[in-house]
Each structure stands twice: as C-alpha cells, then as structure tokens.
Amino acid sequence: MLASRPLVVAVGGDGTLNEVLNGFFRNGAPIPTTSKLAMVPLGTGGDFRRTLRIPVDPRQAIDVLRGGMVRRLDAGCVTYQTGEGTTAVRHFINIADAGLGGDVVFTVGNGTKRFGSAAYRIGGLRALMSFKNKPMTVDIDGATHELPKAQQVVVANCQFFGGGMKMAPSASPTDGVFDVILIKNAGKIETLRGMNDILSGKHLDQSNPKMELMYGKRVSVTSPEKVRIDVDGEAVGYLPALFEIQPGAIEFVTPR
C-alpha cells in the first residue's frame, strides 16, 4: 500500500504520528518503500514537532508539505512486555522512557487528557504523588548500570516530551544514537523544584549526581518490579524492554 502513496501525512499529535510511523515497519524492520512521512500537528503533547520546528499552525505546516525538504531520520525499535505478559515490538520516533514517565502517560490517557495543553502538568503531578522509585538495571551498549532506586530511564531520539519539557536538549534524530538519561533516586520535592530547569533544558548543565546523560545504540532496561514504559507519549506496556536505534530508517518532510 505504501508504494502507491508518495507522501503519508499524520494529522494529529505524537500518538497519531506513532501509529502512522509503525505502518512503515513490519517484523521490526522498515518496509521497502519510496513513501515519505510528514506531520500536521494537532493533539495534546505536540513534542516531536518541536525538535524539527514543524509549525504548530496547520496552514503553515501544510506549507511545509509543499516546500519542505526530505531528511532521513532515525527511528527507535522497542521490544517490551505487554499487560498480558506477551512480547511485542513497536517503533518510535521521539522519546521512550521507563518509570515515572510511563505512569504520567498512563494517568494522562486515563483522565487528564481533557485538560488539553495542561494535561501533562496535571497528570505529571498526580503520577508523581503516587510514584515510588524502582530498582532498575540498565545496559547501554554492553555497559551495565545498576540503579538501586531510579525514578526513570529516558531513551531519547528527539529533545522534548511531556508537553514541552526539554528532557534531552542535545538529542538529534539524525546522529544514529540515543541520548539516554538516567534519573536516579530523586524525591518528589526535588523533582518539583527541578521542573523549570527541565522545561528550559538546563537540568543537564548542572552537576547533579542523580541525573546522568549517556549515549548508546542498544539499551536494555529490566526491573524485578512492575515498571511502565511509554513510547511517543503512549503507554504501551512494561519492562523488560530493549531499545534499539535504526539509523536513517524513515524519510520525513521537514522545514528547510
């Protein structure tokens, strides 16, 4: 079907884009096609478009479809456990994470999405109040990191998540690697105090022993406890999860 469509446009938010993106893959690998992917942003979070500076105004976004440029973007592939205990594979183009972020997305999807642009702030506060840090083991390209108590592990292909938080300020969807952010045993008050730094992308500029930035192409995350994961702002399942980068896997129409 893709072969007959030179341009496939996702009209919606990050979740809609993720659904369309997954139509370009089968059995964990890209489907051979000359079709390009593009986006007209509408939706709750609107995080992916921020990294590529796709206009939020639909008319301006349509102008990008007409006069933009085609770039090869990396995609992430995650193998994870579903709520039924089976193994599933899904692709993502923005950010995936395990821990608090997964709980935030679950909360947003089950009640706060109706608040529009404020959904992630409200959902984040609700999730944070009930969340308990979990033990996680993170393997990044063969190097193992034991986190006795971790708030979340972020696997970033792009920069923004959670409705505009600049979690991975140096991430690029064209560099062939993930930015991996380990957020260790951060407390609730500590997290709230640091929100402005995360919004502006300054949280990694400081010497914070509870936050570490690393880079990798293959990231495995496990836990003896039940830990939610989300991909592109959608709660999909639980750990264990394996995240793998697929460099240049998708042709995407972006602003010039």
Image: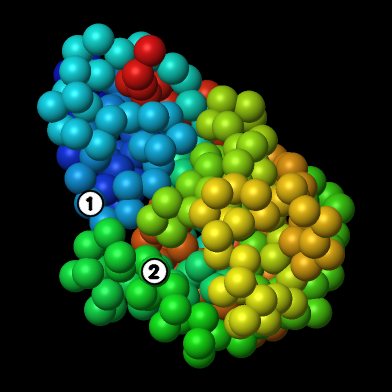
Amino acid carrying label 2: it is Arg
- Residue 105 visible somewhere in the drawing: yes
Near mark 2 (Cα within 10 A), the count class, few <14, some 14-19 or many ≥20, is some
- Residues 68 and 77: in front is 68
Kind of element beneath mark 1: loop
**What residue sits 28% from the left and 30% below the top?**
55
Residue position marked by numbered label 1 in the rendering: 43
Near mark 1 (Cα within 10 A), the count class, few <14, some 14-19 or many ≥20, is some
**What residue sits 83% from the left and 56% below the top?**
207
Image height of 107 relative to 66, above or below: below
* Among the two numbered marks 1 and 2 on one chain, the one whose residue lies closer to the N terminus: 1
Image height of 191 relative to 33, above or below: below
Position of the N terminus by quadrant: top left
Q: Residue 72 in the image: x percent, y percent?
A: 47, 20
Circle nearer the viewer, 1 or 2: 2
Say whether marks 1 and 2 touch (CB < 8 Å): no
* Mark 1 vs mark 2, CA separation in Å: 15 Å
Image height of 19 relative to 60, above or below: below
- Residues 220 and 99: in front is 99
Residue position marked by numbered label 2 in the rendering: 121
Q: Is residue 228 left or right of residue 147?
A: left
- Residues 189 and 123: in front is 189
Image height of 11 relative to 4, above or below: below
Kind of element beneath mark 2: helix
Amino acid carrying label 1: it is Gly
Q: How is the image coloured?
A: rainbow
Residue 25, disc:
none
Q: Residue furthest left?
A: 59
